[in-house]
Image (cartoon, helix red, strand yellow):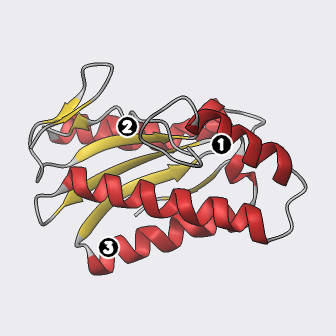
Amino acid sequence: MSYEFEEGYKIRDQAATHFLTFSIMGWIDIFSRQRYRDIILESFKFCRESKKLRIGGYVIMSNHIHTIWTARKANLSDLIRDFKTFTSKAITASIETEPESRRDWLLYMFRFYANRTMANKEFKVWTSTNHPEEINSDSFLLTKLNYIHENPVRAAGKRTFSLFI
């Protein structure tokens, strides 16, 4: 199975290590709140332990995430789909049920984006693209790890959160 993307990027080898970017619709600054970052971190942990995902590195920025992932079950596209589905539902549930000063606006925006697609019924949190780039050499891996490491530096002044594994 090949996972096609608008920019022409696709996952050709489901077992290969890939650099991926997960972006929030409209570049909404959702990860400025710890509880939404915690949803991501808990989902990463679940995927590592239960779905055999190997995470080579990541950075959580205010409105997107860069990761290096390897699916040890050769099912990277499925992992991406499941991760985005679960975290989208968990983030919107958190917005709906926990104190959030931007609740009405956030829910309005995620509904607005969902209304423009057939794939999402109520809310669309993540963009459809992930810009997958297969890591095919040690030098390319180092380039992408450096990119992850430097991303918060380049975004100087913006709140960013990262962990390197």
| In the image, farthest residue toward the right | 101
Distance Cα–Cα, label 1 vs label 2: 18 Å
- Location of the C terminus by quadrant is bottom left
Q: Which mark is in front, 1 or 2?
A: 1
Q: Disc 1 or disc 3, which is closer to the eye?
A: 1
From what the image shows, is residue 84 above or below residue 150?
below
Would you call the spot at circle 1 few (<14 residues within 10 Å), some (14-19), or many (20 or more)?
many
Sooner in the amino-acid sequence: mark 2 or mark 3: 3
| Residue at (42, 39) in percent of width and height | 21
Q: Is residue 94 left or right of residue 70?
A: right
Mark 3 Cα-neighbour bin, 10 Å: few <14, some 14–19, many ≥20: some
Q: How many marks?
A: 3
Residue 159 seen in the current view:
no
Could you say which disc has been placed on residue 48 in the image? 3
What residue is disc 1 on?
A: 110
Q: Amino acid at mark 1?
A: Phe
How far apart are labels 2 and 3 at the CA level?
19 Å
Q: Quadrant of residue 72?
A: bottom left
* Tag 1–tag 2 contact (CB < 8 Å): no
Residue in the image at 61% along x and 40% along y: 152
What SS does tag 1 mark?
Answer: helix
Residue at x-position 35% and y-position 38% = 144
Q: Name the amino acid, label 3.
A: Arg
Question: Which residue corresponds to the image point at 22% horizontal and 72% vertical from the top-left?
Answer: 52
Q: Amino acid at mark 2?
A: Asn
